[in-house]
Image (cartoon, grey):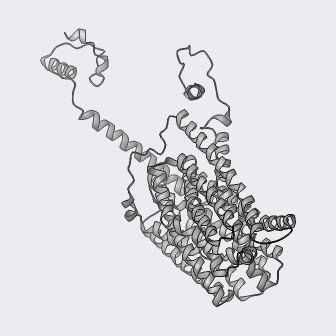
Amino acid sequence: MALEDEQEALLPGSDNGFSSSVPQRQMPAICDPSRLAHRIVVLVLMCFLGFGSYFCYDNPSALQTQVQLDMKVNTADFMQLYAFYSWPNVILCFFGGFLIDRVFGIRLGTIIFSLFVCVGQVIFAAGALFNAFWLMEAGRLVFGIGGESLAVAQNTYAVSWFKGKELNLVFGLQLSMARVGSTVNMNVMGLVYEQIKAAMGSTGYTTLGVTLMIGGVTCLFSLVCALALGYLDRRAEKILNKEQGETGEVIKLTDVKDFSLSLWLIFLICVCYYVAVFPFIGLGKVFFIEKFQFSPVQAGAINSVVYIISAPLSPVFGFMVDRIGKNIIWVMCAVVATLAAHLMLAFTLWNPWIAMSLLGVSYSLLACALWPMVAFVVPEHQLGTAYGFMQSIQNLGLAIIAILAGVILDSRGYLFLEVFFSACICMAIVAVVMLYFVNHLKGGDLNLSSWEREKLQKQAAIEAEKQRLRRQNSESRFRPLSALEVRVRYLSRLGAQLPEHYCSHLSSLAHRSVLK
């Protein structure tokens, strides 16, 4: 009843049987799904939805030295923890988007994926507690099943609640909060391990397991956010009388073959860029210890610089891209800056804070400019599948490169590894150049300014309204006549007098008693 009362309060002009002079009840802005205050609450929940997943994703990186010593594994085996996270998402992330669109819906799907994240982290920690590295790998596998699909759900929620010029800013805010989780992990988990070691009086796999179990609390927090977000989305659906994800079109798995060349180039940029960022951060702590003689605390701090910078800059860059447009140009700037950062780390002994700061700025800019472009090149009913496929290809690259990076590091060292990462970035630059020309030749809007894009959207809305009116007129013109209308037309042709208030296209105004 309370929900129905809220719905009635939102419907203008509805007097519910009372006189129109009675003032309508108005919901507080924070409770009204159509108001900005309520959408800000939803945005906060969206941002915290991925906090636990991102916090625990880089637990191995924050504890790289401890994992290798306590579990007695080399670098190649250590990187399997990242590979096992990525392998299931080569397939499941794509189906995660499909399941969101067709099977579970956005609300139930988000809750299910959050549960996978929680269970996976518990298994991962239990593997350390029982000194079973294979169980830790299994935990990362389960964690990965939920982690990337949860990111797809988060993106789909964002597109569902925020559109147009708001979208880039929303993506930036989501990334910002995710990177807060990663930053806290990089700087806190090592200290937690030391505190647990001091409390237990010894080091070893038990200390590692307890530390990882404590980190899993953040996953429970994200699960609570998923439940709250699901409730608010369901409430908004009922109050605003809108169907969840209803577009009138049916999505098929075969739609993948119809993806445009521009979308495939976006996928390629995504893969080539992120395989040069995440695996590097996964191995970065030891890199800074060995090359620059940093202490473990200093190495952990500088390894988290990318995330520290990304947290505040992501919403700023998102707002900037919203206002300016020109997404492809921003992507090119980000990729070139990332290449410069890797070259500095590989061939110079400059203070690594310079290169890592540049990497953090470019990483933030690319995320705010690249991911929203998917919404510009695919229909809305395919967004879940498109984002899922993008995550799938990204994870295929990350799984392969994580293993390859561990092998290269064990056999050739960090210099060769940095050259390899630089080559991946060069491939991304080639893909960005191709995307620019493909978009230009096909007249796409990926590189339009914000005011040009807004103008096109208004023209498209006007054209859609014209088509709707033409369809409506066509349907009314060729609609089969009712028995009453046939009789009226027959009498009029005979010259019979018809009532003055009768209108031939409004049969409800004709009085049958007059024509008897």
From what the image shows, is residue 129 above or below residue 500?
A: below
Residue 204 relative to residue 81: left or right? right
Outermost residue on the bottom side: it is: 412
- Residue 38 placement (x, y as % from top left): 65, 40
- Residue 464 placement (x, y as % from top left): 41, 46
Residue located at (83% from left, 73% from top): 297
From what the image shows, is residue 516 above or below residue 219?
A: above
- Residue 304 placement (x, y as % from top left): 75, 69
Number of numbered discs on residues: 0
Residue 214 relative to residue 223: left or right? right
Viewer can see residue 9: yes
Front residue of this view, candidates 424 and 59:
59
| Quarter location, residue 118 | bottom right
| Quarter location, residue 80 | bottom right
Looking at the rendered image, the quarter that the N terminus falls into is top right
Viewer can see residue 317: no
Outermost residue on the left side: it is: 494
Looking at the rendered image, the quarter that the C terminus falls into is top left
Residue located at (56% from left, 13% from top): 19
Front residue of this view, candidates 22 and 299:
299
Residue located at (81% from left, 64% from top): 192
- Residue 331 placement (x, y as % from top left): 59, 69
Front residue of this view, candidates 365 and 135:
135
Outermost residue on the front side: it is: 130
From what the image shows, is residue 182 above or below residue 279?
A: above
